[in-house]
Image (cartoon, rainbow, N blue to C red):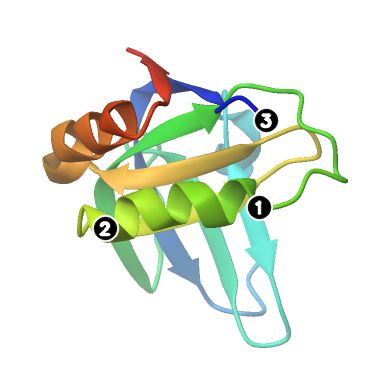
Amino acid sequence: MPKQTLALHPAHFCIHSLDHGAAIPSEILQAPIFFISKTEDELSVVVPDNIPLNSEASDGNWRALEVLGPLSLSMVGIMAQLGSVFAKANVSIFVVSTFDTDYFLIKHSDLSGAIDALRRDGYKVNE
């Protein structure tokens, strides 16, 4: 199977942890791109850095590499293969998925090394 192409999203992102019982702030729903995850224990959101949120904890200055899709839900190993490239390059990732694709969030300070590692491993990265 040929290796995927990834595209660098222009925004910088912030990962927030909100109180488990908190309502989803309307600012999130107005953002051009956002990700929400909720379990029995936590509520996490990822939004562009310029969306101000009052959260319990946050970590900003992440960039997103989108695996260009759509990807079939039956495809096997894409996250594992890409995660392996990042691990070998000592790059920490935060992954979010949609129905059609995956996004690998990488700290801006690690972005150049991450892109270099991907290219050395045969991936195409559109910047």
State the image coordinates of residue 104 (x, y, percent, origin top left).
Answer: 46, 44
Viewer can see residue 24: no
* Front residue of this view, candidates 81 and 99: 81
Spatial CA span between label 2 and label 1: 16 Å
Nearer the camera: disc 2 or disc 3: 3
Instruction: Choose the circle earlier in sequence order: 2 or 1.
Output: 1
Which callout, 1 or 3, points at the residue further toward the start of the chain? 3
**Which residue in the protein does label 1 denote?**
77
**Residue drawn at x 40%, y 45% as measured from the top left:** 105
> Which corner quadrant of the image does residue 62 belong to?
top left
Per the image, the residue denoted by label 2 is 88
Element under label 1? loop
Q: Amino acid at mark 3?
A: Met
Instruction: Identify residue type, mark 2.
Output: Lys
Residue for badge 3: 1
Residue type at numbered disc 1: Gly
Residue 59: x, y in percent?
A: 28, 59
Q: Quadrant of the N terminus?
A: top right
Which element carries disc 2, helix, strand or loop? helix
Question: Residue visible at 46% across and 69% down?
Answer: 17
Q: Would you place residue 63 above or below residue 124 in this image?
A: below
